[in-house]
Amino acid sequence: MRRLIAVLLGAAIGSVAVFAAFYYHLVRTDKTWLIVPKQRLDWRDAYVDIRGWSPRDWGAHGDLSHDLIVMGRGDLVTRSVADQLFRGLFDSFREASPSGRGSNSPPSK
């Protein structure tokens, strides 16, 4: 009976671990640990240690960087200089449009 309980307990713990790896990133930063919900369900990047990552590393883990930005922790994502310039250029156009609409949208009545 003890072995059966041990097997069932092990199966339950394993199932919870598989579920967590499928739905969440466990991220190690310089100061803390984060549990970040995944926007796209898959097995990649279940555990990630981002200490000392370069912009190239972030480029290889696009889903993780997007999920961190969605969670409000975009400050952890290091971007390349070209990417920052490119995004800054389009952000300035987005801020310049009235009421958040692009220039092609029809005027309000």
Image (spheres, helix red, strand yellow):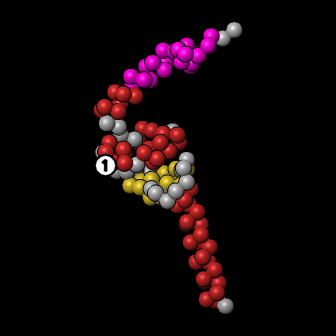
Q: Can residue 17 be seen in this view?
A: yes
Q: In this view, does 17 lie to the left or right of 31?
A: right
Instruction: Classify residue 78 by image quadrant.
Output: top left
Q: Is residue 92 above or below residue 10?
A: above
What residue do we see at 65% from left, 84% from top?
Answer: 5
User: Which residue is outermost to the top?
Assistant: 109
Residue 42 on the magenta segment: no
What residue do we see at 56% from left, 19% from top?
Answer: 100
**Numbered range of the magenta stretch:** 88-107
Residue 96 on the magenta segment: yes
Q: Is residue 3 above or below residue 18?
A: below
Q: Position of residue 22 (x, y in %)?
A: 54, 59
Q: In this view, does 82 lie to the left or right of 70?
A: left
Q: Where is residue 7 in the image (x, y as percent from the top left)?
A: 60, 83
What residue do we see at 42% from left, 23% from top?
Answer: 90
User: Which residue is outermost to the bottom?
Assistant: 1
What residue do we see at 37% from left, 48% from top?
Answer: 60
Q: Position of residue 69 (x, y in %)?
A: 48, 39
Q: Which three-letter amino acid code belongs to the residue tagged 1?
A: Gly
For the N terminus, the quadrant is bottom right
Q: Name the residue under label 1.
A: 52
Q: Is residue 107 above or below residue 81?
A: above
Nearer-the-camera pick, 20 or 103:
103
Q: What element carries label 1?
A: loop
Q: In this view, does 8 lie to the left or right of 49?
A: right
